[in-house]
Image (cartoon, helix red, strand yellow):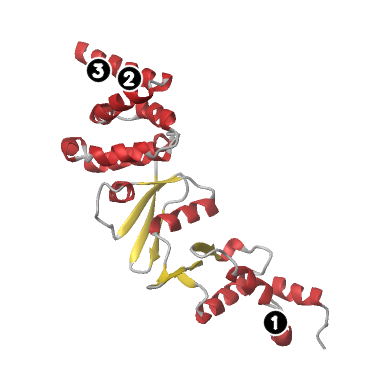
Amino acid sequence: MPPESSGKANFVAKSGKYCKYFKGMKADSPLKQLIRDVPPGTVIFRTDYPEYNAEFVGNVLSRLVSDGDIVRLSHGIYCRPQMSRFGAVMPGMAQIARSIARRDGARILPAGVTALNELGLSDQVPVTSTFLTDGCARRIRIGSRTLEFKRGVPRNFIYRTDLAACLVQALKAIGKGQAGSVDLGRIAELIETEPNKDSFFSDLRLAPVWMRRLLMPIIRKYRKKAESPVTRHLMKAHSDGMRHQADS
């Protein structure tokens, strides 16, 4: 005869053993409610609940999918969708990628067309969303799309601001030969909303010379507007670099 204490029921949830004997006690209810209480739009992983047996967590997640409470995105990856008057709204690929990176303790940044799209420099939505990572390289199928993590060299992650890191990758995707097609107005808008402008302009010292030259009209605008020591230092460094190139 199964024990009657709630402590034993909790043991069942953790061990995954003898669940069939505890149907009346609803041993999975605490975990079910815990998952149902996550904020809408949250990406959920089967590994988010290490205090429970992994197989048991998988069974609870499967039941919640059947109940319509959550949606399965990929193997071991779920979400509680946000609801709108048009129906369920799934998290974007960038949010899923960042959630995976947080889980794995890895750094990531968008690359190629993904970087262009994230900054609003392209309307093209890639079928494969590509991110550089200092973690494991892999490809994950999310519905009809693919999330790809590529190993990035350490230099990709030296920037202090996300905007600088992403902008460098976006401009790389465009290429030096097509620099004239870059929407400088859009980049200026992004810089305007950047909360750490001094750090951003300092980051630009680490970008390729052709990118700094491309962004000089924007840099000059903010030099006049802010005249911060960091921006003046960047301008001097850029001018010295241009002079050195001309002399060599």
Q: From mark 3 to mark 1, how far is it between C-alphas? A: 71 Å
Q: Which residue is mark 1?
A: 26
Is residue 24 visible to us here?
Answer: yes
Q: Quadrant of the N terminus?
A: bottom right
Q: Position of residue 108 (x, y in %)?
A: 43, 46
The label shown at residue 235 is: 2
Q: Quadrant of the C terminus?
A: top left
Tell me if mark 3 has few (under 14), some (14-19) or many (20+) residues whose alpha carbon lies within 10 angstroms of its own: few
Q: From mark 2 to mark 3, how far is it between C-alphas? A: 11 Å
Q: Residue at x 27, y 42 (%)?
A: 186
The label shown at residue 242 is: 3
Q: Position of residue 53 (x, y in %)?
A: 66, 69
Which mark is nearer the camera, 2 or 1? 2
Q: Position of residue 79 (x, y in %)?
A: 49, 67
Tell me if mark 1 has few (under 14), some (14-19) or many (20+) residues whose alpha carbon lies within 10 angstroms of its own: few
Locate residue 240 relative to residue 73 in the image: left or right: left
Q: Position of residue 86 (x, y in %)?
A: 37, 73
Residue 108 higher or lower than 81, as above or below: above
Q: Quadrant of residue 192?
A: top left
Do residues under tags 2 and 1 come within 8 Å of each other at their CB atoms?
no
Q: Earlier in the sequence, mark 3 or mark 1?
A: 1
Q: Residue at x 58, y 63 (%)?
A: 47
Tell me if mark 2 has few (under 14), some (14-19) or many (20+) residues whose alpha carbon lies within 10 angstroms of its own: many
Locate residue 56 relative to residue 234 in the image: left or right: right
Residue lying furthest top: 247
Locate residue 12 relative to residue 243 in the image: left or right: right
Q: Residue at x 70, y 82 (%)?
A: 26
The label shown at residue 211 is: none
Badge 3 amino acid: Met
Q: Nearer the viewer, residue 162 or 134?
A: 162
Badge 1 amino acid: Lys
Q: Residue at x 61, y 73 (%)?
A: 55
